[in-house]
Image (cartoon, rainbow, N blue to C red):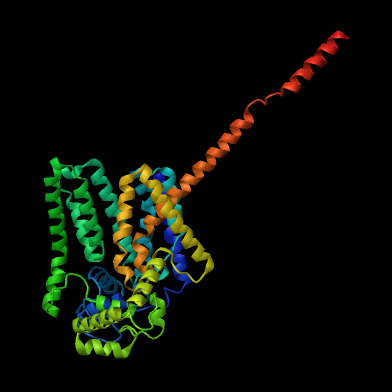
Amino acid sequence: MLKRYSVAVFIFSFGLRAAVAWKMGFFRHFQSDEMVRIALSVLRYHEYGNPYLIPTGPTAHEMPVYPLFMSLIYLLFGTGAAGEAVKILIACAVTALRCALLPRFCMAAGLGRAVGIISGALATVYISALQTELRGNWDGPWQALALLVLIWMTIRIWSDSSWLERTPFLYFILWGWAILLQPAFFQILAIFLLAGLIMTQAPVRLRYLQQSIALVLVVFAFLAPWTIRNYFQFGKFMPTRSNFGLEFWLSNGPGRAFDMKTNLGFEVPHPSLDLREAQLVRQMGEVRYNRMKLDEAASWVRSNPRDFVRLTLRRFLAWWLPPERNVFFRVAGLGLTVCAVIGLGLMFRIRPLVASLFLMTWVCFPVIYYVIQWSSKYRYPLEWELLVCAAVTLSSISRALLRMVNEKSSVSRQPEAVPEYGRVARERRVSFNSTF
C-alpha cells in the first residue's frame, strides 16, 4: 500500500508542479540567471564563465555541478523552448521524487505509517519557493533530494552499525557530490562527524576516526578538480565559490533591506542587473571585485554594528518565519514552523537519532544565510524536514482526537447507572401492583 501511495504522490506532485509552471508562463517566458548564463557560456564559448549581464570572463560564482548539467540539456535539446521545457520538467520530476520518497523515509526512520502518509500529502501541495522549485534555473530541488538521501543513509548506517564492518563508499561518494553541489552541506557533515565522535564508545572510536578520515578525503577528492581549476584560473586557493564578498556587500550596507527581492529591486546594484557593476567586474576581475566588495561591507559593519545586528535578526526571523506578502501564505508559514518545532520535540521522545540529525541540520545549515539577504531559495533544501516534523505533530493530534472519540464512544455504550431513588421508587411500584 505504501508503495502505491508513493507512486500516487509522485504522479500528483509532478502533475501539479508542471501545471503551475505552465500557468505561470515558465514554458514561454525564459529567465537568465547566473547559472543559466554560465551554462550558455560553456555551450557557446567552451568557458565556465560569464554569469553577469555582459561577458566578464571565467567565474567561480557558482559551483560547477548544475551549470554543467544545464549545458548538457541545452546541447541536447537546444536553448529555445524545447530546452527550457526539458529543464522545467526535470526540476518538477526531481521535486516529485523527493515528495514520493518522504513516506518511505518516515517508515525507514521509524516514525510510523501515519507520519509518512501525512508528510507525503503535505509535500505534494507545499510549494514554498516557486521559481527555485519549478523553473529549473537553480539547483534547489537537487540539493533537497541530496540532503534527504544523506539523512536517510546516515540513519541506516548508525542504526545497524554497518560502518564497523565495512566502509560505506556509496555514502562517502554521495557526500562528496552533495558538497560539490552545495558547499554549505560541509558544515552539516562536520557537525555529524563531531556528534558521532562524542557518542561513539571508546572500543570502536579508532575505527570511527578511520572511517571519518576516509570520508573527508573522499570529499576533498571531489573538490580537488574544482579547486585546482580555480587556482590556475585565478591564482588563488578557492575550494568553493568566489561570490561571498558580493553577496555580503549586497546584504550589508547603507539602505540595505533584509531580503533579496527588496535589495535587487531598488538601489543596490548587482552585476547581473547593473551594467556599470558588470563592467567593473570585467575590468577588475572577479576575485579582486569580490574582495573589494567584502572590504566595503566589512568596513560598514564595523562602523554600524547595531544596524548589522538588526539586519541579522531580521534575516534570522525571515528564515524561520518567511515574510510572505499574502496573509494566507504568511499564516501557513507560521503554522508550519510552529508545528515543525513541536514535532521535533515529540520526535525526540520516539526517535531521538532522527530528531538529533534534524536539529543539527537546522542549527548549522542556515548560519551563513543569517548574514546575507533572505531568499526563499536558500531555505528550500531543508524544508522537507519541516514537513516531516509538522507531520509528526499532526499525527499526534489526530491520535489524541481519535482516542478522545473512542473514550466517549465506550462511555456511551456502557449501561446507564440507575439512581438510588429511582430504584426504590420502582420497587415500591412493583410492591403496590403485586398487592392489588
The reply, left or right, for residue 368 in relation to residue 228 is right
Image label count: 0
Nearer to the camera, 189 or 37: 189
For the residue pair 330 and 134, the one nearer the viewer reads as 330
Instruction: Please state the horizontal and vertical placement of residue 387, each as a whole percent of the image.
Output: 41, 55
- Can you give x and y, in whole percent of width and height, for residue 218 in the image? 14, 58
Q: Specify the quadrant that holds the C terminus.
A: top right
Residue 64 in percent (x, y) is at 22, 71
Q: Residue at x 23, y 46 (%)?
A: 157
Name the residue rendered at 76%, 22% in the picture.
Answer: 422
- Closer to us: 359 or 406: 359
**x, y (%) of residue 168?**
18, 49
Extreme top residue here?
435
Residue 414 seen in the current view: yes
Residue in the foreground of this view, choosing between 235 and 116: 235
Which image quarter holds the N terminus?
A: top left
Q: Please give left or right for residue 381 compared with residue 229 in the image.
A: right
Write the residue at 19% across / 85% down. Answer: 285
Residue 12 visible in the displayed image: no
- Position of residue 416 relative to residue 3, above or below, is above
- Residue 427, placed above or below residue 281: above
Left or right, residue 113 beside residue 210: right
